Amino acid sequence: MLVEPDVGAHRASPADAERTVRLAHRVLGRLDRLRRLSNDRWRVTCLYRSVTECTVLRELGFPARVVIGARAVENGVLDAHAWVECVGVPCASTRGDEPYEVLAPASIHL
C-alpha cells in the first residue's frame, strides 16, 4: 500500500537516488520494448513508472509519494496522469505543464 512512509536516514544521496530512478525507468523502457515484440500484456504507463519510481525512492529512504490527477480534455473526455513527488530528489515522473486536478482520498465517515 502506498501510504506515507516511516522514513529514517536516507540510505543514498539525492544524486544517487536520481541515477537509480533513471536506471529503473530504462529497465521499464526495455520491458515495454519486449512487450511489443512478444505481444505480452505488460504495459508501461505513467502509473507503472510512478509506482516503480516511488518504490525505488522509498527503498533508498526518501519520502516519495505517487500523485494521481485528472483533467477534462476535448469533448468531455477525461485524461488522467500519475507522477511522483519527493522533496530533495528530482523525479523522472513529473506532473508536467498540464493543469491536472489532484485526486485526493475523501474523508470517510462511518
Image (tube, rainbow, N blue to C red):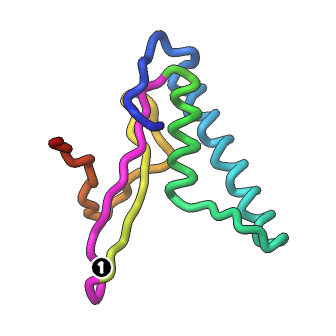
Q: Please identify the quadrant where the C terminus is shown.
A: top left
Q: Amino acid at mark 1?
A: Val
Q: Secondary structure at mark 1?
A: loop
Q: Quadrant of residue 70?
A: bottom left
The residue to which callout 1 is attached is 73
Q: Is 17 a magenta residue?
A: no
Figure disc tally: 1
**Left or right placement of residue 46 versus residue 83 in this view:** right
Mark 1 Cα within 10 Å, few/some/many (few <14, many 20+)? few
**Left or right placement of residue 27 versus residue 102 in this view:** right
As rendered, which of 86 and 42 lies closer to the eye? 42
Q: In the displayed structure, would residue 19 be above or below residue 25? A: above
Residue 84 position, x and y percent, is 43, 44
Residue at the image position 26 percent from the left and 48 percent from the top: 104
Q: Which residue is farthest front?
A: 110
Q: Which residues are magenta?
A: 62-76
Q: Which residue is farthest left?
A: 109
Q: Quadrant of residue 66?
A: top left
As rendered, which of 103 and 60 lies closer to the eye? 103
Residue at the image position 48 percent from the left and 10 percent from the top: 9
Q: Is 64 a magenta residue?
A: yes
Q: In the displayed structure, would residue 15 be above or below residue 84? A: above
Residue 69 position, x and y percent, is 32, 58
Q: Which residue is farthest right?
A: 38
As rendered, which of 4 and 27 lies closer to the eye? 4
Residue at the image position 57 percent from the left and 53 percent from the top: 48
